[in-house]
Image (spheres, rainbow, N blue to C red):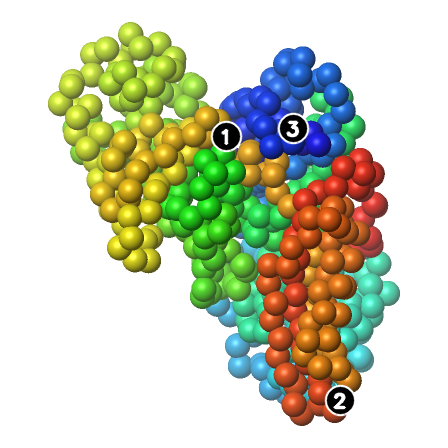
């Protein structure tokens, strides 16, 4: 099976071709302001190699930070109509109450709170006030809102109020992009509602971005289905990403760590990914990133996304270096490295310039940095190494000396020995580990459902079968499915030994499925 993995970072866009378990070719190009330009450039660079174009490509997988960057930077966001179902309780903290004011001002359209919802045990809390939902939808329409987020109390237990409200809104605003919170989050109302609001705010950008990705692939001459990588290291069809872009928020970091595990063959290790602007540090357990346990803030907004537990610091290949060499980052030239760094004729001293002067890196014109003071070079490298050691130690959960896998285009900033680690592992194609991680991403299937009239074992088996069916329908090879997560909660207050079961399975993308054209997007 031949897959192309692409990672769109803030500085570089990387692309790799993987055939079976071998990395055939890898290229690195500069990220462009329009993002898709960098993807097209990377695909063109890759297609120059005959082994890339000689046979069909089964799938293209893209990992991108485009959507989370839009939230963090407050750009290209829709105004959203927020509909909360939960009165008469749940009105003390209204939607957007914990958002940074600047971001809330950009996203907040109309806010409506109506009666309805369920209790924690699944019993109806109040009947849905359909008249109030209808009135709210008319207010949204009058305000010209095309994006709506609907959140109901305990909707992951029973989503019926959200789905019914969505139907009402859809009859009044047929072309609205509607996000129901039960599709994204878990029990906590505020965090789940925040996820839905962010997803709705990204609706138009997601449509444009995914369409541009598909156009870039078509322009490159490839005829393969497009997948977008998710936070948990699996992929979703592009049509799904159009509807739920928030699921790709942390996929870049996850891809790097999964790629590091694949390239090194090490399943349990610390990983440091040094990019152009930032360095991400995390821990691999059984080949997957250790996940954050608590609330994750995105752009200052509380969410409960499943995110890898990462520490990010302002150190990268494009980081600014002050004149004395003692101050490194957090500012960076980013994707302007090839125009602003000294080795490319620019005027900004960067870590890459220092590495070239020290003979650690072949990049640009070395003669342009020949004048750098050796003392400055020594101080800058010592500062970078200290930042690496200090923050790797912060991310370790015990004193065991795990190996440290160094990947990313700026991995030259990682010393060959780091205190607290058993060894520093450098791998071939490590500078494109994120694209490798995208290319090897698996397909997942998940079910979260209440079962009645059966024992726990039978209920879990039934849920597992349904999750497997979903994974296969999404393109997974049935022979490779693995159950990676099982969670069950007895609902003693309901008749028939009710049990809520959530199961997630993953599998390798199947060849036949990967050549299937992706289905059209369902109306949102």
Relative to 49, does residue 332 appear above or below in the rendering?
below
Which residue corresponds to the image point at 70% horizontal and 57% vertical from the top-left?
A: 445
Residue positioned most to the right:
171
Q: Quadrant of the C terminus?
A: bottom right
Relative to 431, does residue 68 appear above or below in the rendering?
below
Report the Cα–Cα distance between label 1 and label 3.
16 Å
Image side of residue 261 versus residue 162, left or right:
left
Check disc 1: other Cα within 10 Å, few if <14, some if 14-19, many if 20+.
many
Q: Nearer the viewer, residue 14 or 433?
A: 433
Q: Secondary structure at mark 2?
A: loop
Report the Cα–Cα distance between label 1 and label 2.
53 Å
Q: Nearer the viewer, mark 1 or mark 3?
A: 3
Tell me where residue 220 appears, x and y as whole percent. 72, 22
Which residue corresponds to the image point at 44% horizontal and 42% vertical from the top-left?
A: 266
| Residue for badge 2 | 496
Check disc 3: other Cα within 10 Å, few if <14, some if 14-19, many if 20+.
some
Q: Are marks 1 and 2 in contact (CB under 8 Å)?
A: no
| Residue for badge 1 | 432
Which residue corresponds to the image point at 63% horizontal and 83% vertical from the top-left?
A: 490
Residue 208 visible here: no
Report the Cα–Cα distance between label 2 and label 3.
50 Å
Residue 247 visible here: yes
Tell me where residue 465 appears, x and y as whole percent. 75, 63
Image side of residue 393 versus residue 317, left or right:
left
Q: Nearer the viewer, residue 106 or 450?
A: 450
Number of the label disc, if any, that sits on residue 19? 3
Sequence-wise, the earlier of marks 2 and 3 is 3
Tell me where residue 235 appears, x and y as whole percent. 65, 46
């Amino acid at each position: 099976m031949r897959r192309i993995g692409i990672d769109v970072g803030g500085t570089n866009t990387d692309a790799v071709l993987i055939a079976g378990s071998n990395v055939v070719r890898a290229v690195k190009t500069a990220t462009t302001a329009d993002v898709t330009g960098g993807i097209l450039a990377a695909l063109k660079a890759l297609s120059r190699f005959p082994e890339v174009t000689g046979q069909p490509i089964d799938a293209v997988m893209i990992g991108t930070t485009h959507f989370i960057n839009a939230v963090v930077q407050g750009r290209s966001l829709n105004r959203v109509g927020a509909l909360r179902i939960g009165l008469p309780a749940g009105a003390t903290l209204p939607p957007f109450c914990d958002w940074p004011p600047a971001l809330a001002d950009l996203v907040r359209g109309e806010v409506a709170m109506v009666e309805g919802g369920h209790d924690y045990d699944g019993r109806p809390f109040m009947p849905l006030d359909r008249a109030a939902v209808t009135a709210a939808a008319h207010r949204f329409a009058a305000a010209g809102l095309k994006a709506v987020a609907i959140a109901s109390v305990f909707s992951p237990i029973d989503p019926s109020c959200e789905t019914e409200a969505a139907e009402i809104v859809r009859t009044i605003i047929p072309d609205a992009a509607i996000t129901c919170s039960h599709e994204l989050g878990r029990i906590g109302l505020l965090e789940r509602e925040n996820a839905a609001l962010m997803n709705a705010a990204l609706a138009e950008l997601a449509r444009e971005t995914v369409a541009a990705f598909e156009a870039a692939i078509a322009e490159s001459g490839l005829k393969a289905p497009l997948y977008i990588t998710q936070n948990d290291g699996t992929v979703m069809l592009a049509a799904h990403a159009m509807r739920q872009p928030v699921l790709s928020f942390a996929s870049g970091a996850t891809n790097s760590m999964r790629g590091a595990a694949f390239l090194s063959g090490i399943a349990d290790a610390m990983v440091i990914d040094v990019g152009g602007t930032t360095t991400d540090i995390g821990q691999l357990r059984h080949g997957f990133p250790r996940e954050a346990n608590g609330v994750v803030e995105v752009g200052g907004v509380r969410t409960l996304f499943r995110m890898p537990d990462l520490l990010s610091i302002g150190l990268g290949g494009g980081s600014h270096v002050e004149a004395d060499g003692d101050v490194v980052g957090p500012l960076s030239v980013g994707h302007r490295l090839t125009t602003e760094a000294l080795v490319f004729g620019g005027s900004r001293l960067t870590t890459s310039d220092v590495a070239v002067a020290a003979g650690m890196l072949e990049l640009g014109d070395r003669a342009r940095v020949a004048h750098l003071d050796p003392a400055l070079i020594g101080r800058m490298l010592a500062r970078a190494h200290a930042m690496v050691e200090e923050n790797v130690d912060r991310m370790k959960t015990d004193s065991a000396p795990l190996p440290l896998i160094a990947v990313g285009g700026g991995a030259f900033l990682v010393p060959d020995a780091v205190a607290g680690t058993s060894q520093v592992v450098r791998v071939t194609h490590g500078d494109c580990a994120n694209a490798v991680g995208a290319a090897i991403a698996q397909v997942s299937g998940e079910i979260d459902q209440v079962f009645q009239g059966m024992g726990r074992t039978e209920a879990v088996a039934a849920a597992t079968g349904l999750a497997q069916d979903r994974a296969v329908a999404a393109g997974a090879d049935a022979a490779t499915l693995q159950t990676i997560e099982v969670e069950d909660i007895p609902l003693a207050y309901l008749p028939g030994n009710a049990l809520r079961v959530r199961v997630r399975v993953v599998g390798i993308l199947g060849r036949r499925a990967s050549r299937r054209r992706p289905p059209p997007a369902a109306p949102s």
